[in-house]
Structure formats: C-alpha cells, structure tokens
Image: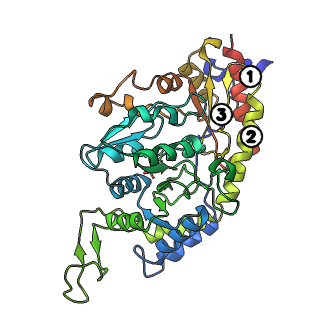
C-alpha cells in the first residue's frame, strides 16, 4: 500500500478539496420562496411565521410552536416560561453547545452539570436525582448528535420533583422514540417535540434544516405558548381581554419584560421550503451513518456511536471515540492527520463546565469525570445530506489510512 503516506507527513491527501463537517443544502425552490417574501408586503411579522410554526408543530405532533430569531433565544424564553429566576438551579449536561447552560445564566440562575452516560454520551438520568435541591426548577436534557435523551426516565424524575423538562433538540429534529419505549399507543406522535414540556429546535445552517439563523420552541401547553410569545416581543400584548386599560385602536400594553427575539418572514419562508425536504435529508443522514458504522465497527480501538434502545437518531453529528491506549498518537495527532487529508473533522463539544466563564464561577475539572475523559477521545466526522457517496468513501479511506498509521 503506497498511500500509507499520511498527508501530514508530506504524502498525497485522500482528497484535494476540503470537506466540512456540516453544511446546509439549499435549492432553487428555497431561493424562490425567499424571493417571493422579499417581494411581499411583509418582511417580518407577516403570515409566513405562523405558517412555519404550524407546519413544525404538525410535523413533530405538538400543539403549539413559537418561532424565535435563533435557538438560543428560544431556550432563554423557555427557561423564562418555566419560571426560572434569580438563584434557581437548572440541571443540564456538560456535553453540549454553551447555549444549553447560558440560557439559565441569562435569568440569574445557575446550571448544574450532571455527567453523561458512558455509552449514549447523553445526560445520565441515574445521576440526576443526586443533584436536585430545593432550588432546582428544570432539567434541560440535550439530544446530543441527534440521539434522543432518555426522556422516559427524565420525565419520571421531573414529575417526582415537579420540575419542568426543556429538551434541547437542536440536533434531533425528526428523531423519534418507539411507542413501546414511551408506553404510548400506536397513533400518538413519538417524535422529539411531542414529549417534553417544551422542546427547542435550531435552524442554524449546520442543523437539519436552516433559516440562516432561527429557532423554535414547541409545547403542548397553551400557558407556555402564551408566555413564549409575549417574551419574544417585549412582553407586549394587544389582547384586549387581558389589558388593564383600553385607550383605542392604537393601544397596547407591556405586561412583563420581554425581548425582541422575533423571527422574520424571510427566514420563515426559507424554513417552510426546507421543511419539505427534512424527511429526505434525515433518510440520507441515517443511510450515511449506517455506512460509517459498517465501515468502522470492525476496527479495534474505535468505538462507534451507541444507540439507546427505543430511540431513533436523526444523526446531526457522527463521532468516533478512540481508545487512545491502543494508538501511538493522541486525539490531537489523529485529528491533525485527518485534517491534512482534507477531511474537516471537528470536536463536539468542549465540556461546558470547563469553559473559562464557568471555571471563574466555581465549576471546573473533576465535576463530570466521564465527560472530561470522553472529551479527550472524541472526533466528529463530516455528515450532511449534500455529501456524495464519493465524499463518504473519502472519509472512510482517510480514517482507515490514519488508523493503520497510528494503531499499536
Ligand atoms: C445549535 C445549538 C444551540 C443553539 O442554537 P442557535 O440557533 O445557534 O442559537 C443550542 N444547543 C445545541 C446543542 C446546539 O447544537
């Protein structure tokens, strides 16, 4: 084998063009949908937002959906609607994007990090109860990589302690639970979004579908939906049935402190068009994840993603875990070698409790040992629907090349 020459050592890279880890896929229909909105009377606060909300609510099987300018704003609003306030505690996982914890800080409350399960890499439900105090208000499980969190166990605990569950489903639009897993009847929606008190989706370009920036909270609760809508738009209402006074047709009242967190109609029209393709995108992601699994499951020293029984990932990310004692290289060297082959590998995520902002506030190493160990061993491979089979094959070739170069 003469292509054993790693590109990082001066050899020929597996591919000439850099392959990113994730990327949006827009076609002419998407572009046309945006142009139509640009030509319409409404750029924002028009009909497209309600249409997009209704379509997402229907898709996941939730009663209400409230669109936001991004997923993080949605998480902020969900924490507010859940009643999270100064000094409260909210339980979440360290293996996530910082937004899952920051949304708690926005309200003056404190995230409490519970370590991950060493197989699923999602929050370990068995470790949640130990961290519940009289100040705990909510749990924010994250469906890391698109694999749904163990929501049945999490809801049992939340019910016992009267906590609100806000599922961070930025990775898992379209993911499902089995009916048997949820003990639900056939016919009920078992999609992520139908189960938790509130569920957040993100429409950032690397996520399943995109609106440029954008997010949504879905819920079955009318009370939460109203709170979310109010928070999204300055806490202002023009609903005469709840206003204190009425000065005339121009009159509105600000009843609570909210933000301008609205999505535009431009974004929503793109979202509606993208939603039509979601199932096709997920099908491709699942197929590619399967091909990766087949290719890597036989390589000793590499751990392919484990899937919790009863859950079906929508595969936002695909990551490999390296048992580093079986290699002559560390994660950084393996990562650099793959990058040199023009494979845009990445690392998701740096444990949030190790970020300087959180370390300054008393969090730090030792808090979540499984997550900290895992972080040293993980590499994200490219996975997005616009990839071709040739792209997938080049990733597999590069992983094999680097694997055999560094395997003890
Ligand atoms: C992308 C993401 C968010 C934030 O969504 P934005 O739309 O970028 O604000 C939150 N949590 C997780 C896990 C994410 O991946």
Instruction: Write down the residue under mark 3.
Output: 305
Q: Would residue 237 be visible to someone looking at this image?
A: yes
Query: Of helix, strand and loop, which one carries label 2?
Result: helix
Whether pointer 3 and pointer 2 mark residues with C-beta atoms closer than 8 Å, the reply is no
Label 3 to label 2, Cα distance in Å? 10 Å
**Quarter of the image where one finds residue 15:** top right
The residue under the point 60% across, 21% down is 334
Residue 401 placed where, x, y %? 72, 23
352 vs 11, left or right, is left
Q: As rendered, which of 220 and 343 lies closer to the eye? A: 220
Considering only vertical position in the picture, is 284 above or below 399?
below
Mark 2–mark 1 Cα distance, whole angstroms, equals: 15 Å
- Dot 3 falls on a residue whose secondary structure is loop
Mark 2 Cβ and ligand 1 under 8 Å apart: no
Q: Is residue 256 left or right of residue 30?
A: left
The outermost residue toward the right is: 1
Label drawn at residue 299:
1
Instruction: First in sequence, mark 2 or 1: give its number.
Output: 2
Q: Where is residue 214 in the image (x, y as percent from the top left)?
A: 46, 58
Beta carbon at label 3 within 8 Å of ligand 1: no
- Give residue 57's position: percent from left, percent from top: 55, 66
Q: For the residues marked 1 and 3, what is the alpha-carbon distance in whole angstroms? A: 13 Å
Viewer-side label of 1, 3: 3
The residue at which mark 2 appears reads as 290
* Image position of 397 with respect to 18: above or below: above
Splitting the image into 4 quarters, where does residue 298 fall?
A: top right
Residue at 27%, 29% in the rendered image: 360
Is 12 on the left-hand or right-hand side of 106? Answer: right
Q: Earlier in the sequence, mark 3 or mark 2?
A: 2
Res. 124 in view: no
Quadrant, the N terminus? top right
């Amino acid at each position: 084998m003469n292509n054993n020459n790693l590109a990082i050592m001066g050899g020929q890279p597996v591919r000439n063009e850099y392959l990113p880890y994730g990327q949006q896929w827009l076609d002419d229909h998407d572009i046309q949908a945006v142009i139509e909105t640009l030509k319409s009377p409404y750029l924002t606060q028009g009909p497209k937002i309600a249409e997009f909300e209704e379509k997402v609510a229907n898709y996941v099987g939730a009663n209400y959906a409230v669109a936001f300018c991004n997923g993080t704003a949605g998480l902020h609003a969900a924490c507010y609607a859940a009643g999270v306030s100064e000094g409260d505690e909210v339980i979440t996982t360290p293996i996530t994007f910082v937004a899952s914890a920051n949304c708690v800080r926005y309200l003056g409350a404190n995230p409490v990090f519970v370590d991950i399960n060493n197989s699923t890499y999602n929050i370990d439900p068995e470790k949640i109860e130990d961290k519940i105090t009289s100040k705990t208000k909510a749990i924010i499980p994250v469906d890391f990589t698109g694999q749904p969190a163990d929501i049945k166990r999490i809801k049992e605990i939340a019910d016992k302690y009267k906590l609100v569950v806000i599922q961070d489903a930025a990775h898992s639009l379209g993911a499902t639970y089995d009916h048997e897993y949820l003990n639900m009847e056939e016919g009920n929606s078992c999609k992520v979004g139908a189960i938790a008190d509130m569920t957040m989706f993100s429409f950032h370009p690397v996520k399943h579908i995109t609106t440029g920036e954008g997010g949504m909270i879905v819920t079955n609760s009318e009370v939460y939906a109203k709170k979310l809508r109010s928070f999204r738009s300055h806490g202002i209402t023009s609903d005469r049935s709840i206003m204190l006074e009425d000065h005339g047709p121009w009159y509105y009242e600000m009843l609570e402190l909210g933000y301008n967190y609205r999505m535009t109609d431009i974004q929503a029209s793109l979202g509606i068009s993208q939603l039509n393709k979601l199932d096709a995108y997920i099908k491709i992601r699942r197929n590619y994840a399967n091909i990766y699994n087949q290719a890597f499951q036989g390589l000793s020293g590499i751990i392919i993603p484990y899937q919790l029984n009863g859950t079906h990932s929508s595969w936002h990310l695909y990551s490999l875990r390296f048992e580093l004692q079986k290699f002559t290289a560390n994660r950084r060297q393996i990562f650099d070698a793959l990058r040199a082959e023009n494979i845009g590998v990445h690392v998701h995520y740096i444990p949030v409790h190790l970020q300087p902002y959180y370390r300054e506030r008393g969090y730090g190493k030792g808090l979540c040992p499984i997550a900290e160990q895992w972080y040293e061993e993980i590499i994200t491979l490219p996975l997005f629907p616009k990839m071709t089979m040739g792209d997938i094959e080049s990733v597999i070739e590069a992983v094999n090349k680097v694997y055999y170069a560094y395997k003890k």
